[in-house]
Amino acid sequence: MSEGRAVPEATVARLAVYLRVLSTMCDGGVLTVSSEALANAAGVNSAKLRKDLSYLGSIGTRGVGYLVEVLRERISTCLGVSEHRAVVLVGIGNLGHALAGYGGFRSRGFRIAGLFDADPNRVGEDICGLRVRGMADMQAVVTRESVSIGVIATPAEAAQEVCDRLVAAGVTSILNFAPAVLVVPDNVDVRKVDLAVELQILSFHEQRKAAGLTVVL
Amino acid sequence: MSEGRAVPEATVARLAVYLRVLSTMCDGGVLTVSSEALANAAGVNSAKLRKDLSYLGSIGTRGVGYLVEVLRERISTCLGVSEHRAVVLVGIGNLGHALAGYGGFRSRGFRIAGLFDADPNRVGEDICGLRVRGMADMQAVVTRESVSIGVIATPAEAAQEVCDRLVAAGVTSILNFAPAVLVVPDNVDVRKVDLAVELQILSFHEQRKAAGLTVVL
DNA sequence: TAGATTGTTAATCGATTAACAATC
DNA sequence: TAGATTGTTAATCGATTAACAATC
C-alpha cells in the first residue's frame, strides 16, 4: 500500500488519452489548463475528468486549474511510462511493418527490443533500423532486455504458438492483433485489438441509427 | 419497437467475438455447442455468455445447448453484418496497406468501396486489386456506394481534416487509427484504436504486477 | 425419470454524472 | 470580497456474477 490507490480500469484507459493531449499542449507552450478545457480536448466531460484525476491525488489549484507540465509528469508516473519499457514484436507482415514503423512508440515510453518472424526469408531484413530475427533468438532477447510486453501481429493460425513462446520466454503482457482468442496463464495479461470487431460494433450502431430514422420518418 | 431490445454496449462487443468463434466452429463442422464450451472458446464465463445471448431472445435448447449455425445467423443479423456494409479507407501508409490487405474484411461482412490518399504520387497505385483514389473522388464514391463507415489511417495532423471530409460526404461512423481526438457532429460515431494507449494500459498493469511481487517477496 | 443445460433473477460491483462545498 | 474552478459526495446507471427454477 503506497500512494495512488486502486485506479479503476476505465480511468487508466482515459489517463493515457489525457497524457497525449497534455503532451501536445506542453509542446504548444500551454502552461495551465482547466478541467473543462482538458476534458473538451480529450472528448470527455469535465466531471469525469476531475474524478479520474482525483485518483492521482489532489494536484490542481481551485479557481485556477492544473499545471500542464506537472499533470503530464504525474500521469506518466502513474502509468509507468517513465520506465521506458521494452517490447518485442512478432510477425512482420503488413501490419507488423506498420507497427514497427510507428513513430509514437519511442515518444510514448516504449522501445522495440526485437522484431521476430517465423519465415526464414524474412530473417535478417532491416525494418526502420531494426533487424528481423528468427524465433530461436526470442528467449535470449527477452531475457537480456528484460522484455515484459509482447505484440503479436501474425496470422490467426500462428498466434497461439507465438503466444506460448512469448510466455515461456517470460513475457507477462501481450497485445494481440491476430484475430484469435489466446489462452494464457492467469498471471499473463492479454489485450486484443480486432479490426473486424471494431467495424462490427460501428455497424451495429449504424443499423440502430437507421432504425431510429425509419421510426421518425 | 421491434424484436431484440436494448442490447448493452458491452454485449455488442462480445457478440462480435462469439460470431468469430462460431464461424470457426461452423467451418469445422460442429453442429451444436453449450454455453460452457462457447464461453471457454471466447474467453468469457458462461453466465455472461448466456446473459449476452438472452438479449437475442430465447434461442437455445435446455439440456442440449445451441445450434451453431442458428446462433451464428442470429448474431449476424443482430450486428447487421448480413447487410454487407461498404467502407472507405483513407491514408495508404504502412497501416493503410495492412488494413487494405486484411482478408477478414470480406468474410466479416464488409466491402472496401474505396481507398484514398492525399498524396498525388500514391493515386493510381494498385493495392490488393483496388485503385488508390485522390480525395477529390471521395464524395462521389461515398454517395454512389452508400458508404456509411470510414476508416482513418492517416498521420495525426491530417486526421481531423479527413474526418471533416468524410462527414461532409455523408459518412456517419468512423474508425480512427490516427493518434488524434476527432471532433464530430452528434450523429456521427467515432471509435478510436490507439496502439500507444493499449500499450500504456498494459504497462500500467505490468507495474501493478511488479509492485505486487515486491510486496510478496 | 435422471442428467444436462438454458434463461432469468437478484444481489453485487464498478462507472458515470450532477451538484456543490471547499478554496484559490 | 467576488469569481472561478477544484475535489468529493451521493445518487444513478449499467455490467457482472452466482445461483437456480424451468425444461429439454
Image: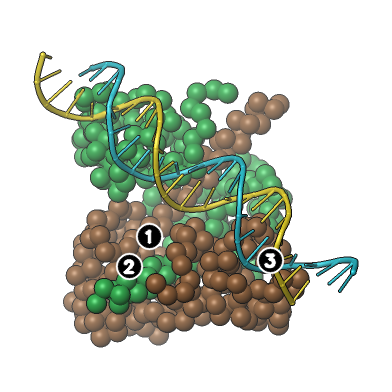
Chain colours: A green, B brown, C cyan, D yellow
How far is mark 3 from mark 2, CA to CA? Answer: 32 Å
Judging by the rendered image, the residue that carries numbered circle 2 is B173
Q: Are marks 1 and 3 on the same chain?
A: yes
Q: Quadrant of residue B85?
A: bottom left
Q: Which mark is residue B35?
A: 3
Judging by the rendered image, the residue that carries numbered circle 1 is B191
Q: Verify CB contact (< 8 Å) between mark 1 and mark 2.
A: yes
Task: Name the secondary structure under disc 1.
Answer: strand
Query: At x 48% / y 27%, what residue is drawn?
Result: A4
Upstream in sequence: badge 1 or badge 2: 2
Upstream in sequence: badge 1 or badge 3: 3
Is residue B73 depicted above or below D18 in this figure? Answer: below
Q: Which mark is residue A192?
A: none
Relative placement, left or right, of B153 versus A145 is left
In percent of width and height, residue A167 lies at 68, 51
Q: Amino acid at mark 3?
A: Ser
Task: Name the secondary structure under disc 2.
Answer: strand
In percent of width and height, residue B61 lies at 69, 74
How far is mark 1 from mark 2, CA to CA? Answer: 8 Å
Query: At x 52% / y 32%, what residue is drawn?
Result: A6
Relative placement, left or right, of A58 versus A185 is left
